[in-house]
Amino acid sequence: MSRLLPGGDGPGGSSAKGVFARDFQGMTPKYAKNDGDGRPDYFRDSLCRFFVRVDPNEVDLFKSSITDPVIGRDAVLNRLMGDPRGAKGYVDFVLQNAAIPFQELIQVGQALSGNYVAYAFDQAPVTIPLQGFFINSVQDDQATYFVRLYLNILRATALARRQKVVSLKVDSFILSGALTSLTINLESKFEVMVPFQMTLLLKRLAIVEYTASWVPTTVGTPFSADLNAVPMDSRVVTERPIHTTAVRTPNDLDEQIERGEVDARAAETPAAPSDLVVSPEEAAGVTDAQSSLRTAQSALVVAEGRVNDLDRRANTLLSDAGRGGDLTAYLATTAERETARAELARARTAVAAAETELTAANGRMARPAPQTNVAPTPTPTPLPAEVRSSPNPEATGH
């Protein structure tokens, strides 16, 4: 007799599982594996844990670098560090919340006619806040031991000295990086629990122990019945703006067509846009404009840096001259600063011109949308003469 797994395929099979399963819906926590008779110690084996990978040839050197005799004991170190295939990890803390923020580095530059240019510079550094508590009792003195571990091993400076990273395993993720802060809160109202806040600067993310047989849920309806509702992107060489006009069909469109108030073409399916083909000359023009803008922006950064350096130097020389120093050097620096400011003004003008050229190049690629299926604006029906001339609508009987 085959075993039916809650949330799995029922009799006859189904394309939906889990909470969408046809016969037996299920949502089992990952720590409850239910993979055999009896119940293993899920509570301890599923705890999140810290770990520092140390290769066998580095173990003695790593242990000798620990100056705290309490942390240097094998009973502590052998749980925290070692070979990940054999060492278990350090679990003497309770993690309640870990937020993993993924953020792109995006620079958006405004252009003319409501357009914009977005530059993507890959992913921003991921800083993960960790919140939880330590058990603070005679039997489980977790708070003091973890503070010792943080000061000697887990903080970023201590890890950098040893060329190591710390890894935190939580759920199906292994987060590797360095702890950049630790805050513990000692409260008299509940002495056996010490809340903490930590910050982990992420270097590497690994996904482990995931459900390998899981497949996305299948639905029965298409994403959109209107092909034109989803923009098509046929860009080959460079980015270009796409202008879309959405027209909402009135609920009483059929009645308006019968009365002759709206053109019958308003009920037709809009034709596909004809402005999706980009000529090589247009694409090359945008590429050249983007390159010119980047060059101008780089020159602007250099010019701004030079002016700032000369400002600082002139201020220093002026202060020295006030105390009897050489005034000639100050005058020479101010003359050089004026030249640099003129170069800065020219660099700003070049950036503005490059932005204008890029906007024009993008505009040449954005052709107007076809107007064949746009319904004409209905002409409003004039009111009767007696209504227009009457100052009081009630006097006309309406």
Image: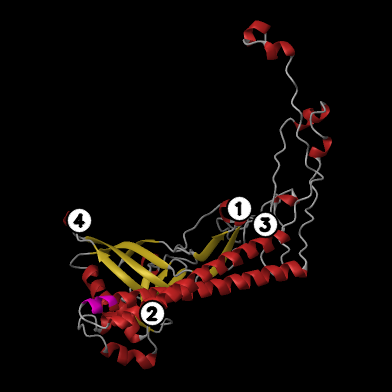
Name the spot of residue 175 as percent of width and height, x first.
Answer: 43, 72
Name the disc covering residue 114, or none: 1
Of the image marks 1 and 3, the number of the one nearer the N terminus: 3
* Label 1 – label 3 distance at C-alpha: 52 Å
Q: Nearer the viewer, mark 4 or mark 3?
A: 4
- On the image, numbered disc 2 is attached to which residue? 165
Name the spot of residue 313 as percent of width and height, x first.
Answer: 33, 78
* Label 4 – label 3 distance at C-alpha: 53 Å
Q: Amino acid at mark 1?
A: Gly
How packed mark 1 is, by other alpha carbons closer than 10 Å (few <14, some 14-19, many 20 or more), is few
Q: Residue at left 37%, top 64%?
A: 129
Describe the element under mark 2 as helix, strand or loop.
loop
* Label 3 – label 2 distance at C-alpha: 46 Å
Q: Nearer the viewer, mark 2 or mark 1?
A: 1
Of the image marks 4 and 3, the number of the one nearer the N terminus: 3
For the residue pair 131 and 139, the one nearer the viewer reads as 131
* Label 2 – label 1 distance at C-alpha: 46 Å
